[in-house]
Image: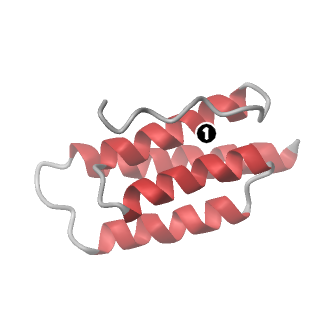
Amino acid sequence: MNEHFEFGKRLDALIVRVEAWSYAESDAGAGLPVEVARELTALASSAPSLALRQGVRRAQDALDDGLSAEAVAAALYGVRAALRAGGGQLPAPPSPSG
């Protein structure tokens, strides 16, 4: 269970960073997406279940595809919801049109 707790702490910290990036009035600079990408990779490698790892990878895909910080955060919210529900199934990803 400690593994889930540590993963949850890291996930929450990353969500805070992505939210701050999302709400920044000015461009966060090229370094922040690179740092977020690095943190996503580390988070995925420490995920305590396959479902959680896949959820983090959705966030990585959103970042790699150049989607908004809100899209990255949305994927991470899904991971957090799954973790709090016991690490089970992740919610379906949002449709590309929505």
Percent x, y of residue 15: 47, 45
**Quadrant position of residue 31:** bottom left
**Which quadrant would the C terminus be assigned to in this image?**
top left
**Horizontal placement of 9 versus 40: left or right?**
right
| Image height of 57 relative to 12, above or below | below
Residue 3 or residue 94, whichever sits in front:
94
Q: Element type at marker 1?
A: helix
| Image height of 19 relative to 14, above or below | above
Q: Name the residue rendered at 70%, 46% in the picture.
A: 52
Percent x, y of residue 92: 56, 31
Residue 70 or residue 94, whichever sits in front:
94
Percent x, y of residue 12: 55, 43
Give amino acid for label 1. Val
Q: Which residue is mark 1?
A: 79
Percent x, y of residue 94: 44, 32
Residue 80 or residue 98, whichever sits in front:
98
Number of numbered callouts drawn: 1
Q: Name the residue rendered at 72%, 32% in the picture.
A: 89
| Image height of 32 relative to 54, above or below | below
Q: Name the residue rendered at 49%, 59% in the picture.
A: 60
**Quadrant position of residue 90:** top right
